[in-house]
Image (cartoon, grey):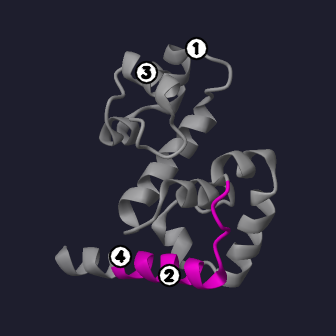
Amino acid sequence: MEKAPSIGPKTARRLEAVGVRTIADLLAASPDEKQTQINVRHISAQVIRDWQAQALLACTVPGLRSREAQALVACGVRDAEALKAHDAVALCEAIAEWGISDEGQRAWGTAPAPTPDDIATWIARAERAAMEASEAA
């Protein structure tokens, strides 16, 4: 679980204790139920929903890093369909604004902020993944 976006070793142990051992377990989990089972104030159902959205993005948009998925979810982009609908420049500005927040600084660390070209690449990858999925169906 530690490889999931936003989940460190301590949180991974808490999740494992309530039966969430894999990304698939996380995606299938009921956030309300897991919040109750974990019973730690800072792990709310909404936090778990955010982790689910981050994991889904990281799993469905090829090459998307954990911190990038975290930034996207923080800016309201919760899945590849939503990412495809965004303008790269506007989303870059939103991520830059989030990046100066305490949460953004913790998540992004010293990594360089994404450029509009980086975000355009994420969008293109989301579009390509959706097209490949529809062709496979």
In the structure shown, which secondary structural element does the residue marked by tag 1 occupy? loop
Q: Residues within 10 Å of mark 4 (few under 14, many from 20)?
A: some
List the residue tagged with mark 1: 39
Compared to residue 18, the image places residue 71 above or below, namely below
Compared to residue 88, the image places residue 62 above or below, namely above
The nearer-to-camera label among 1 and 2 is 2
List the residue tagged with mark 4: 130
Residue numbers of the magenta segment: 110-128
Name which residue type carries label 3: Arg
List the residue tagged with mark 3: 13
Answer with mark 4 or mark 2, whichever residue precedes in sequence: 2
In the rendered image, residue 116 lying in the magenta stretch gets the answer yes
Q: CA distance from mark 1 to mark 3?
A: 13 Å
Q: Position of residue 81 (x, y in %)?
A: 48, 71
Answer with mark 1 or mark 2, whichever residue precedes in sequence: 1
Q: CA distance from mark 1 to mark 2?
A: 39 Å
Tell me whether the residue at label 3 lies in contact with that at label 2, contact meaning CB atoms closer than 8 angstroms: no
Which mark is drawn over residue 121? 2
Answer with mark 1 or mark 4, whichever residue precedes in sequence: 1
Q: Who's the residue at 68% across and 19% down the image? A: 41
In the structure shown, which secondary structural element does the residue marked by tag 4 occupy? helix
The nearer-to-camera label among 4 and 2 is 2
Q: CA distance from mark 1 to mark 4?
A: 37 Å
Using the rendered view, name the quadrant where residue 112 is placed: bottom right
The nearer-to-camera label among 1 and 3 is 3
